[in-house]
Image (cartoon, rainbow, N blue to C red):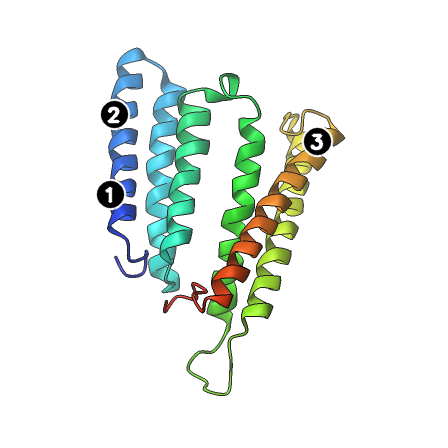
Amino acid sequence: MGKALGKSRGNDLFELALYVLAAVCFVYFLIKGNMPKVWQAVLITAVLLLIRLVVRLTKTTMFAALRFCVLLFIFIAMFMANEFGFYSVIPYLDKFEHLFSGVILCFIGLLIYEKASDKENKTVTLSAKVAIWLCLFFSVAMAGVWEIYEFTTDHLFGLHSQNNSLLDTMTDIICGSIGAVLTSLYLVVQAKRKRLPLIDE
């Protein structure tokens, strides 16, 4: 299981710290009587456990860089933004989250490419160029899909995820796309160094 989640002692400690922080938040906000924050702590724990469950059920190896990005995103989006209310403290925190989501989705695209490739078939050759293009297009597409989801839920349930603003929607997509482009460039450099993180590396 440790191998499936990436060969990194640092990631193990990071994840453990998130569990501890969630437990502290649970107790603190329970004492304060702030039930929404209490349930947020429960949700964070559930998300961390769900990731482990999905990795185990799909028998997928989450390489270290992806695992770190996912854990960091959980800390920023679920702890800093929601649990600690940093949306009102840090300007454009939401845009940073979308930028970072582009990074994560790019790595997930790489994981999907590796998973979809039949490595047992010796006639199949994993192509770094194809992998990177897939990562880029997958990440940019998912940025658009997320905004479609927000648009749909806003109109069906009267939410305000997009603030009834085309500017907000397009800025979110642009931020996610920038994260995807930057990550793709990083993967290009890694590929040239023969260090593209396709599971075995």
Residue 27: x and y in percent read 25, 21
Task: Tell me the CA gap for discs 1 and 3.
Answer: 41 Å
Quickly name the residue at label 1: 13
So how many labels did they put on this image? Answer: 3
Q: Amino acid at mark 2?
A: Val
Q: Quadrant of residue 78?
A: top left
Residue 155 tag number: 3
Dot 2 or dot 3, earlier in sequence: 2
> For the residues carrying marks 1 and 3, which lies nearer the camera in this image?
1
Residue 93 versus residue 145 in the image, above or below: above
Is residue 113 rendered to the left or right of residue 149? left
Quickly name the residue at label 2: 24
Dot 1 or dot 3, earlier in sequence: 1
Q: Which residue shows up at 36% across the image and 65% down it?
A: 59
Residue 125 versus residue 13 in the image, above or below: below
Q: Amino acid at mark 3?
A: His
Residue 170 tag number: none
- Could you say which is closer to the camera, residue 46 or residue 22? 22
Q: Quadrant of residue 169?
A: top right
> For the residues carrying marks 2 and 3, which lies nearer the camera in this image?
2
